[in-house]
Structure formats: structure tokens, C-alpha cells
Amino acid sequence: MRMPDLIAIEEKTFYGIAVSPGIAIAPLHVIASDTAIAPDAYHIPDDRINTEQQRFGKAVHITKKQLHELEKRIRTISGEDEARIFEAHQMVLDDNSLINKVINAIGKRNLNAEYAFFAVMQNFLEAMRRVPDPYLAERTVDLEDVCQRVINNFDRHHTETSAISPDEHHIIVSHDLTPSDTAMIDRNRVLGFATELGSINSHTAILARSLGIPAIVNLGDALIRLKTLSLCILDGYAGKLIVNPTEETVAHYKKLQSEKAAIRLQLEAKKDKKSVTLDGTDLILSANIEFNHELEAASASGAQGIGLYRTEFFLLNGDDIPDEEEQTAAYIEAVKASAPHQVIFRTLDAGGDKLPAEPLDEPEPNPFLGWRGIRVSLDRPEMFRQQLRAILRASAYGKIGIMFPFISGVAEVRASIEHIEACKAELLLEGIPIGNEIEIGAMIEIPSAALIAHHIAKEVDFFSIGTNDLVQYTLAVDRVNSHVASLYNPSHPSVLELMRITLLASQKHGIWTGVCGEMAGDIYMIPVLIGMGVQELSVGTHQVPLIREAIRSLKKSDCEDLLKEIESATTSEEVTQLTRSFAQEKYPHLLDT
Ligand code: PEP
Ligand code: MG
């Protein structure tokens, strides 16, 4: 096992993957938000190793005593079977290999006892979670329970306190962050975040870009080497986390920060300029949002409406899915705030790496290939219609689009449209007004849908290409798995070919096509999309000013020439080389902003 360096007071740089540009300078707050029980992690000096090992022994002893008492009590109240659960819990703590691993982690790696125990338990748990076996899933819950209990039983006398004041600016470093954690980040206090896990197209990274929070993922086992309150610099351009920076480093980054801020201000000042190419092709540049509270920023950025409202974040955020009235109110608010532009509501896209629509009996072995997107809605017609009715009711207040996620074929589109028609008829009978500017769209994010885009085009008014998933499903690369992050290649010729097929089908059938995946906000890929004839780009709010300027710096005819060259490229590397030198030539000042 590798020995971590002791927490350094000298400057130290940790490297990860840059997923959201920007620079943040603030104290660190080390947390492990993926679990409520995660203790603070810190290093101990050699002369405290014995004390820490004894603290661990004591916590285990107390826990075993508690469990023994519980076992006895439960046996009298509920019987033998229930009591056995607590017997099994005690056996976990009798496992010598576990105890030795923790003792070693304290002694050899100078870890504080709580974190040493927690880290060892997490290794066991992660190994168990990887096996899709219902028996092991139950054992996982037992282990989590024991883990929580032992951590609660540590004597806190020796624990270092490392609290961060609630209203202080800080940078979060954690093992992982869920998309919901990220969406809830208080932008006024959290200046940046870094995680040990993660990949560039996880929803966590997407949200960071959208919110304009500098972020790094895939830092490896950095957590244990960091300490809350240490000053640090997060460089979201280069993917670096610099802890305890020297005065020189701070001065360098402060200068860089103000240069970038000045460029950003210049771009933001052009919010009322059209997103039109130099040779006169108008594009719609809209924003992706997850919650209504983002509407104000979207409109302030000059976005022409909402091209992707990821309704699942709003719908699955609380204990229950909001009812029709609550949904209607939220959707009306979105439509009114975006008028005269359109709001495209994507119906619930639960599952995959997002929350499930309802608790599942067993975890899905392959969530990304499982009960996700439109499949869930079609299986739960009541829930689906509740959402459709609410969206239709909002259409009385302005232009809307309804689009379906995770479409794999024509049958799903037809079935979904039937639900819309049924809801319209119901509302009509009930005398509830609906608008007449309603477009229906299909997301093209599964290769099967792209390949039969010419059939789907006959059923809908528009396509929105979800490149995040299209890349994942075309290349068979899990978009959130850091082990295969280097294989996640949006510029792979196969992805571009599927997009080209989609565009050709939409042009032939006279419908429009937009892109709402992250490719739409990728400064290097914009020329490719314009060259293909994409008519709408929907990007994270924070990216709107930059993408508008990129569009305004290009000629469509040049983009078409670039596309011709790209069509004969055989690898992602060749495509990347072409797009990089094109961007370098057309707008060097916009790169790395
Ligand atoms: C996509 O897949 O590109 C997309 C926009 O949808 P999401 O990222 O929410 O899956
Ligand atoms: Mg998607």
C-alpha cells in the first residue's frame, strides 16, 4: 500500500481532470458528502499512533457491547431471527483482517482512527457493491450500519476540529458529489469544487459548467492529504488543485483571474447581440436549466429561451413528485420568464446516473441500459400524463416544446404523442386553456434513433441531439466511469457520422435540429455543428456569452469546408487536430476563457 505524504505545509499540487473553467482561491473544506457518516480525514504525528490505535480499539469494544445488548433485547422482543442480525453485526467486528487493516492504516499511513476505519470499510463496501447479488446487497446494508455505529462511538476528545464557518468562502473537496448536491451548492460561498472521482460528462460536471463553478474531478486519493481550512487555488482550466500556495503563486493566479474576468465582462456586455455567423446564418442560442431558480441568470446571459429544461431535477428533488398543480405553477413561471422565447421541457429523464423515479427493489445491474427516460414514463402513464398536462397548461402562457428523452425508436415516439393528444383532449373537455405554439421533439441520444432519424422525423417537429448520451452509447463508454474517461471521445468519427445522418434526415423532412448535449458548449466543436447545419445550440447558462461570440466569429461557409475535411478523418485524434487548429485560427482569444 502506498504511503501518503504527510499533510504538507509547503505548496503542493494535485492533478485531476478540468471539467469547469475558472479560478478559485479560498480555504478548503474537505467533506465526503456521499455518505452521512464520513468522518474528517487528517494525518497524525508518529507519537500519536498508539493513542489513535487505542481509540479505535475502544470504539470497537463499545460497539460490540452495544450490539450484544441489542441482540439480547431484540431476542426477547422479536425473536431469534431478528436477533441474528445483531449477532452478524458483531461478527463483522470480530474479523481480524478488518481490524488489522485499520491498525495498519493508522500505524503505517498516519491516518486518524475514524478515517482509517472508514476508509477500510469503504473498500470492503465498494467491492461488495460491484457484485450484483441480492444477498451481498443486504450484507452491504449491514456493513454500513456497523460502520456508522463504530464511528459514532469514537471518543471525540482527540478529534481535530476543522469546521468551516457557514458563511465563509471556500472550495469543497470531496470523494464524490451527486448531481443534486452540485445543484444545491450555494454559489455565494462555494467558489469551486474538486472530487476524487468523476468524469467530464457526469451530471455533476455538467452542472458545474452550467453554474459557472470552477471544478476538477478525478483527483485520485487526494482527500486524505488535504486539510480543511488550508488555503488553496483551484485551477479549472488546467485541472490543478494547489494547496498552501506560495505568495508568488497566489499573485500569479490573482492576475490570471482578473484577466479572465475582464474577458468575461466583455463577452457578457454583448448579451443583446444576435447569435449570427459572419455570413448571416442565424442560430438560436438557448440555455439548459435544471431548476427555475436558474431562469433569471439564463435570461441575463442573453439566452434565447430554454433549449433543455431537465425536469427530473425539479421532479425528483423532494420526497414526492410534485403534483399537477405544483408542476403547472413551476412550468408557467419558466414560460413567462423566457417569453417571447421558447421553453423546451424535456419530460422526466429518471434513471441512469440520475435519481430513479421510484425506489427499486434491487439495484439495476446496468442502470444506463435500464429503466431510464421515456421507458419509465411509458410504464407509469399516470405520472407521465400528470407532467404532460402541467406542461400543456403552461403552454397557454407562451411558446413551448415538449421533448422525449432516451428515444430508441418510432414506437416510443408515437406512444408518447398519443399521451399528449389524450391530455390535450382532457384539458379541452375540462375547459382548461392550452396554447397553440407547441412543438414536439425527440432527443437523439441513442444510436438506434439516429440511424432511423428519417422515420422519426415524420413524427415530430424537431430533434435535439443529446451528445452526452450519444457518445456514451455509440462508443460503449460509461459517461461517469473515470476508468474509461479517456475513451469518452465526442469527436469520434462514428459520433459525427450519426449526427450527420440525423441532420440529413431532419433537413429532408423539413424539421429543425438542435444540440443540447455538452458538445453545444464546446468551443472547439461549434464550427463542426454549424457546418452540419445545426439550427439551435442549447448550453449551460454560464457558457452562453462565450458560445455567442464564437458563433459571431465564424462564417458558415468556412465551417462547411472544415466539415468536409473532417469527413475524411478516420480517428478522434485527427478530428481533434483539425478542430483545434481551426479554432486557433478563428478565435484564439476565446480559447481557455
Ligand atoms: C445528453 O444526453 O446529451 C443530454 C442533454 O441529456 P442528459 O445529459 O441530461 O442525459
Ligand atoms: Mg441524455
Image (cartoon, grey):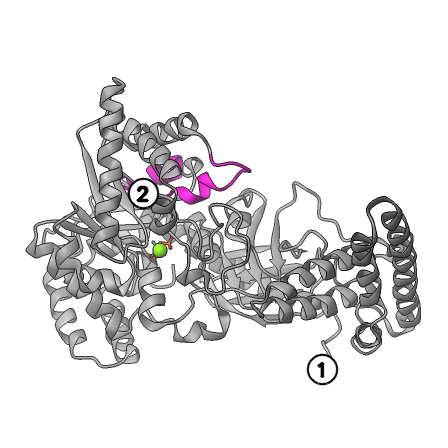
Please state the horizontal and vertical placement of residue 570, each as a whole percent of the image.
22, 81
Give the residue at mark 2.
Answer: 269
Taking the image in four quarters, ligand 1 sits in the one at: bottom left
Q: Which residue is drawn at 25% across and 17% down?
A: 431
Q: What stretch is highlighted in magenta?
A: 295-321
Q: Nearer the viewer, residue 423 or 159?
A: 423
Confirm or deny contact between disc 1 and disc 2 (CB under 8 A).
no
Give the x, y percent position of residue 102: 81, 72
Asked whether mark 2 lies closer than 8 Å to ligand 1, one says no
Residue 348 image position (x, y, % from top left): 38, 44
Residue toward you, 120 or 108: 120
Q: What residue type is labelled 1?
A: Met
Residue 489, placed above or below residue 170? below
Q: Residue 561 lies in what quarter of the image? A: bottom left
> For the residue carrying disc 2, how many other residues have a C-alpha within 10 Å: few (<14), some (14-19), or many (20+)?
few
Answer with left or right where residue 581 lies relative to residue 225: left
Does 173 appear above or below 581?
A: above
Screen quadrant of the C terminus: bottom left
The answer to which image quadrant residue 446 occupies is bottom left
Residue flagged by tag 2: what amino acid is it?
Ala
Provide the secondary structure element on which disc 1 rests: loop
Specify whether 216 is left or right of 110.
left
Q: Where is residue 442 in the image (x, y as percent from the top left)?
A: 24, 50
> Which circle marks residue 1 in the picture?
1
Label 1, label 2: how many angstroms apart (C-alpha)? 53 Å
Sequence-first tag of 1 and 2? 1
In the rendered image, the vertical position of residue 420 relative to residue 180, given as above or below:
above
- Indicate whether 276 appears above or below 167: below
Question: In the displayed structure, does residue 79 sit left or right of residue 446?
Answer: right
Of discs 1 and 2, which sits in the foreground?
1
